Image (cartoon, rainbow, N blue to C red):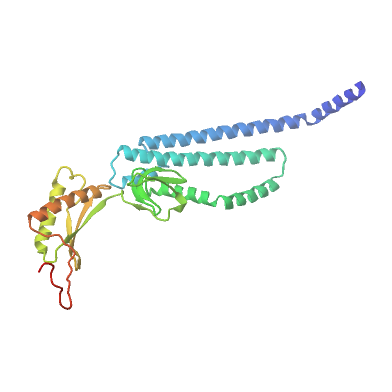
Amino acid sequence: MQPQAFSSATSVSSWFDDHGSSLATHGLRVVVIVVLALVVRNLLHRGVRRLVSTAVEGSVPVVLRPLTDRARGTVFEPTALLSERRRQRTETLGSVLRSIASMVVATVAGAMLLAELGLDLTPVVASAGIVGVAVGFGAQNLVKDFLTGMFMLLEDQYGVGDIVDVGPASGTVESVSLRTTRLRDVNGTVWHVRNGEIARVGNMSQGWARAIIDLPLALETDLPAARAVVLAVAEAVRDSPAFAAAVLAAPEVWGLESLGADGLVLRLAVKTSPMEQWRVERELREQLITALNEHGIDIGVPQRTVRTIGDLPPAVGA
């Protein structure tokens, strides 16, 4: 047993003598590749975090400047709502950038390690391609959601606090992620809508809005007098302290919108700040009713003419 053990130890020792230097060289290269990959990953993550924190604080670097340029083009003021909107966009994109950086570094480092170990990468690349195609077919909806979410964030189609109509649901945006958008409608119901299902977006909160009042009037109404009353009421609302900041331009009476058997319809239009149009409309309706009553102008009501054929039956008790 001892001669055999001595022979085995000698063979192992001779193998190390022959391959030791090569093994040490490869091992050192493997360690260097791993360490460099970790260092590069950490540096990239730190750079992305610095960009995100700088953008959230308000001093926007050139890389993330498109995130706020679109918002600055509107009438939004630098309020807490706008800060939350910018924070969510920048942090979401920062998370995506960190994930992409990690994937790229891991892929490059893995390929270098396999090549250093002397493995043929051709079968690995072919297998990865097949697996990627299979996963792509299975997760195409998820990929569609993420891509759509990316474009929504980059184009600033909507953000936290906006009131939007996305087709399946409408309401106030409470959260925007790469995969879903969370809305709360006027009844308090929370809707979670996949970004890939959103074919069109109607944003009622960007730039400016318009309060539209279609006022029904009786057929015999004096239109010039009614127009003067409506315009006076709208200007009074604009000049009131409660609505001075909400109304952006002089009210306009666009004229007769429709003419029918039930009466006339006079349209009033008032340009307002975003999300103020509904409050302005409610105030206008309330004051218009009072002013029309004071000036003796009747509201349009359905009118019908009834014709009878033949003799009427005698009235009861006649």
- Residue 47 in view: yes
Quadrant of the rendering where the N terminus is positioned: top right
Relative image position of residue 132 (x, y in whole percent): 61, 49
Give the image location of residue 317, x and y in percent. 11, 67
Looking at the image, which is closer to me, 136 or 47? 136
* Residue 205 at x, y percent in the picture: 31, 48
- Whether residue 61 appears in this view of the structure is no
Q: Residue at x 89, y 25 (%)?
A: 7
188 vs 203, nearest the viewer: 188
The image position of residue 122, as x and y in percent, is 69, 48
The residue at 36%/36% (across/down) is 59
Give left or right: position of 251 versus 159. left
Res. 315 image quadrant: bottom left
Q: Residue at x 71, y 38 (%)?
A: 117
Quadrant showing the C terminus: bottom left
Vertical arrangement, residue 138 with respect to residue 51, above or below: below
Q: Is residue 268 above or below residue 101?
A: below
The extreme front residue here reads 317
Report whether 261 appears left or right of 182: left
Q: Residue shown at 32%/39% (left/top)?
A: 81
Q: Is residue 248 above or below residue 80?
A: below
